């Protein structure tokens, strides 16, 4: 998955029914600027996460993971769609986080 | 102790950090080759200003030392300079969190935990400052 694949469909493209687009903004604390993409609302959170990791040049391994948050809610279901999380809003702000512990 | 590469990386990341949109919330003062003072306030208490002293030995390969400084005296051993946040230990003048060297000294096992060990990727100056801001915005209760 590349960020390009998350672009909105061309006007008039037949996808069975109309999809709204959602502007997704993913912040990562170690990056000066957030990752931004305009995506169709049936894009999954997993696809957004993959594109954001790619944009931030981050790699998940079997022992190193990153989590997406919407506010304080962790988006653990990567099959959930952007539209479901955005809940009708046209912009969705997410945070990509590393594991933090307070001993 | 620092080395040229650490200083070069640090200067570059610090300059970038100052360009971030949220940098307007902080007053960042470079005070040494790998050392800064960062003044920041909790969202819930904007008049409370805490001054963090971040000092790296190696950048970005190691976590920084994190202390809170009393701006009036310059002392790093003033408990009331610390915010009350989970993991912070004002009476010991240190923090038990996995983004400062004091936390890793308290928990050496974190160094070998792939999930908790220090991650040197990206802009680590910005990451630590944002981490502190997040602590103050979401976990701050009062000044010690």
Image (cartoon, coloured by chain):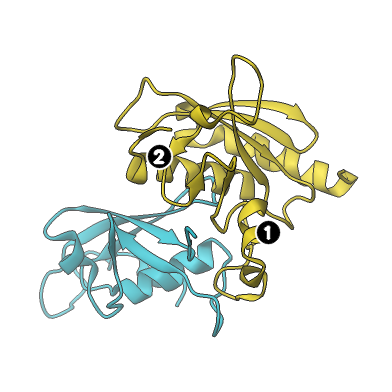
Chain colours: A cyan, B yellow
Rendered image quadrant of residue A35: bottom left
- Image quarter hosting the N terminus of chain B: top right
Query: Residue at the spot x=47%, y=58% of the render?
Result: A102
Q: Which is nearer the eye, B77 or A1? A: B77
Indicate the chain on which mark 1 is placed: B
Q: Does B4 sit above or below residue A81? A: above
- Label 1: which residue? B105
First in residue order: circle 1 vs circle 2 = 1
Is residue A4 in view from this perspective? no
Query: Residue at the spot x=49%, y=64% of the render?
Result: A98
Q: Does A80 sit above or below residue A99? A: below
- Label 2: which residue? B136
Rendered image quadrant of residue B135: top left
Q: Which is nearer the eye, B142 or B65? A: B142
Query: Residue at the spot x=50%, y=34% of the render?
Result: B82
Q: Does B94 sit above or below residue A100? A: above
- Using the image, tell me which numbered label, if any, was put on residue B119: none
Give percent across and percent down for residue B121: 64, 60
Dot 2 crowding, Cα within 10 Å, few <14, some 14–19, many 20+: many
Circle 1: element type: helix
Query: Residue at the spot x=89%, y=44% of the render?
Result: B4
């Amino acid at each position: 998955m590349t960020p390009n694949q998350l672009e909105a469909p061309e006007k008039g493209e037949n996808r069975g029914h109309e999809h709204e687009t959602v502007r997704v903004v993913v912040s990562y604390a170690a990056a000066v600027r957030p990752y931004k993409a305009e995506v169709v609302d049936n894009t999954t959170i997993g696809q957004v996460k993959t594109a954001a990791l790619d944009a931030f040049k981050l790699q998940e391994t079997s022992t190193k993971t990153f989590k997406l948050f919407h506010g304080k809610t962790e988006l653990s279901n990567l099959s959930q769609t952007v539209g479901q999380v955005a809940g009708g809003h046209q912009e969705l702000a997410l945070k990509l986080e590393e594991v933090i512990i307070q001993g | 102790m620092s080395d040229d590469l650490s200083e070069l990386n640090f200067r570059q990341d610090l300059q970038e950090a100052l360009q971030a949109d949220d940098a307007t919330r902080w007053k960042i003062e470079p005070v040494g080759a790998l050392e800064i003072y960062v003044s920041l306030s909790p969202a819930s208490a904007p008049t409370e200003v805490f001054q963090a002293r971040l000092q790296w030995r190696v950048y970005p390969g190691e976590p920084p030392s994190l202390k809170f400084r009393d701006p009036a005296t310059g002392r790093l051993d003033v408990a009331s300079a610390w915010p009350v946040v989970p993991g912070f230990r004002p009476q010991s003048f240190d923090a038990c969190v996995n983004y400062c060297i004091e936390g890793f000294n308290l928990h050496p096992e974190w160094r070998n935990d792939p999930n908790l060990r220090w991650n040197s990727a990206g802009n680590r100056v910005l990451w630590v400052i944002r981490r502190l801001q997040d602590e103050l915005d979401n976990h701050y209760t009062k000044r010690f």
